[in-house]
Image: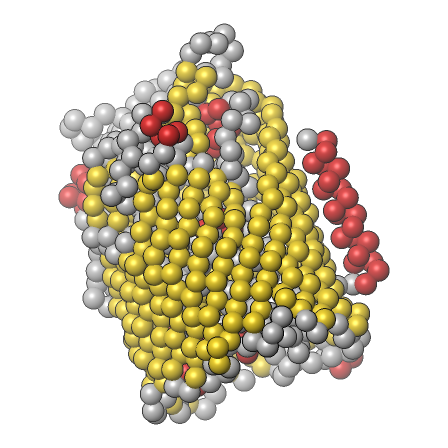
Amino acid sequence: MNLNRTFGRRLLAASVALSALAGAGQTFAADADPGAPATAEGAEVREVVVTVERDAAAAAAPTKASLDETQPESIVTGKFIEQATPETGGWTTVALIAPSVTGITSNGGGIGDYNVVTMRGFKDGQTNVTYDGISFADTNDPTHHGADYLPASTIGAVVVDRGPGTAGDLGQANYGGAFHFFSPDVADHFGVTQKLTYGSFNTQASVTTINTGNIAWLGGGKLLLNFDERRSDGELSFTDGNQFNQLAKFVLPATDKLTVTALYAHEWTRFNFEDSSGPGETSAQVAAFGKNYSMNNDPNSEHYYGYNYERKQTDIAYIDAKYQVLPSLLLENQGYEYFYSNKTISSNDMTGYLGPDQNGVPGTANTSAPNITKAPQSASDIGGYNKLNDYHVYGDIVRINQDWSFGTLKVGGLVEGSQTQRHNEFIDLTLDGLPDNKFQPPKYPFTTNAKLLENSDWLQGQVFADFYWRPINGLTITPGFKFVDFTRDVNAAHENVGGGAKNQALVASNTYTKPLYFLTTNYKIRPFWSVYGQYATSFVIPSLSALYVTGADLQGLKPQTTTSYQAGTVFTHGHLTADADVYEIDADNLYNNCNVPDPTPGNPTATTAGFCNYGKARYSGVEGEASYALPFGLTAFVNGSLNTAKQLANAANAAAGIAANPAQQLENAPKWTYAAGLLYSHGSLEGALTYKDVGSWVVYGSNTSAYFAGGAPTYFGGYDTVNGSVSYKFSHFALKLQGLNLLDRRAVTSYAAPFYTFQAGREVQVTLVAKY
């Protein structure tokens, strides 16, 4: 542990010294060599788009690939986001059109945690999510919340990397790929845009965007301000909420060589949410109330919306200094922080048929009253909990690029630390009285019944080097190396150890180190046609929840690892842009349920439920996308994928009694994706019609593992959706009509026994836009 902290301090000192000496340089100069991929971390959104849109087809395509890419990727530009994605969408909605990407909201209105995205069967937490090069995620594991940080109005472009990337792609979870989001460009000229949206479920939204343009007295500095405010009743019953996001981005050309960019984005959200079930409905609830049921307005019920709500605050900020020391030498330093606070009040259990607590429904006993039977509490009271998840992450990234005639060397590193406070305490919602929708200490808390009272932190360092070698014209070969050193500490007065049956203090630390290797190549057969290949390794560390069940036996779990093999081709010329790829990814050290030594003192021979590294899996498939620019501003596009994700037979599985069944798909891994559509932009009229289909998937009922078949399989047929929009511009105004899920499909989108979630129904929105 001390060695790790020494390593982190040295890396931090190096980054600070580098910043002081030279500021920082942009990852790619304006005249960057075309052999270097434009989508690596640190690139500006303008560079991402300009290097790709070299002809009419690529400019109009909703998703496209770069001729310089070294792994499968899809670039989604701000034009498509504005034209075709939901006005009240978030960062999860703008990437769904890409091949192999799946996920769809289960509640209309655009507020609340009702959507996560997956890719190639890799679930959330196994892929990086970055914003302007900063990887952000929860601190208990690298998962995400779709309602937090970034509404669609704060996103200028998206790059979906279906692979581990290069060594310079920094973050905890390049295991399954990455979603790179970029903030909007700051305009050189003054302008104001106001959007007002009204739609289904009493959804109301306002987005105000102000660009100051170049300010002479600030030496040409320019500022972007964006204010996104929205509220909605939600499609699901009693799930109303509000969300307010403010973003400021300032760009200052301090000298002809030094540019400083500062960004700050803050979001406040409050919404009613059934946290204990996460969300979803039981089959009995669906039969009784339909697919739109979530909560009710009965204060005598555990389902009462006033007992189930979340208040969140998030922010993300950075200062990025870019300095071109020499024509061939570029430096960059990016200091950053991000913050998350989730304050939740929830009932303990939402599985009851109607309530069931004090409303007299026959045959439905109180399911939410555990741990609250001490005087003056009663077993008929409605039990709940008070939950806090509050973390702050801070870090610094250094990048150095040196160009020669024969290649480019990119080196750098990251140092990052976190501080987290979490608690989960049982409370008596009945004795607390009707809540006033404010988060306040409960009148009757029971700290002796605390499920969780925990502080944790981490310190990680990553160093990398990529060399883009150009031995001959048109050929780029890029070997890369990254070393990761990650230490996590936990100091808990109460830890949920032993599957929730035992609570004990836990003070411990675990360290993971890993060298990672990369080798990619790109060859331009013609200026408009390239081929590429990739070999790469990656890993993701065990989640903090592994500490709950393994106690102090922290070194037993190993990081999950992957080895990726990918190859593909890109063609973009004239009216056609197209790309295709094949991939095979071998995964090792997968988690599976097992019995481990009981960590409770006094039980040296006992065992308890835990996790072990049993298993190997293979992800493989083929992907492709194409767009064709037709006359009169019309563009047709199509993309799709065939994906397999299967368990492999191995000795460790056999020793653990886990039967290998290579014929079965892993859980929650769709077998295909397909998308098609038409885009139109000519004169004052714009329109989009898109279709997305996600293939069948399976869960195994009696096994809670995310990977292995152990129970009876339940097969789901997938889901599809048709979205459309049309807008007309006149003078400084535009009117836009948008329909989401036009065919009103309501398929099952997830299942975690006994809860089902369903695809959100048809939604219509009207937006008035004014530009000055």
**Depth check: 324 or 381 in front?**
324
Furthest residue to the top? 602
Q: State whether residue 583 appears in this view.
A: yes
In the rendered image, residue 183, in percent from the top left (x then y), is placed at 56, 67
Q: In this rendering, would 674 be left or right of 1? A: left
- Residue ID at (62%, 70%): 470
Q: Quadrant of residue 703?
A: top left
Furthest residue to the front? 472
Q: State whether residue 437 appears in this view.
A: no
The quadrant of the image that shows the C terminus is bottom right
In the rendered image, residue 401, in percent from the top left (x then y), is placed at 71, 65
- Residue ID at (67%, 69%): 407
**Depth check: 82 or 365 in front?**
82
User: How was the colour assigned to the protein in this rendering?
Assistant: secondary structure
The image shows residue 431, relative to residue 332, as above or below, that is above
**Depth check: 170 or 389 in front?**
170
In the rendered image, residue 729, in percent from the top left (x then y), is placed at 41, 87
The quadrant of the image that shows the N terminus is top right
Give the mark count. Answer: 0
Q: Quadrant of residue 617?
A: top left
Q: Quadrant of residue 460?
A: top right
**Depth check: 530 or 54 in front?**
530
The image shows residue 257, relative to residue 633, as above or below, that is above
- Residue ID at (74%, 47%): 11
Q: In this rendering, would 755 be left or right of 94? A: left
In the rendered image, residue 166, in percent from the top left (x then y), is placed at 57, 58
Q: In this rendering, would 226 be left or right of 712? A: right
The image shows residue 84, relative to residue 618, as above or below, that is below
- Residue ID at (72%, 42%): 8
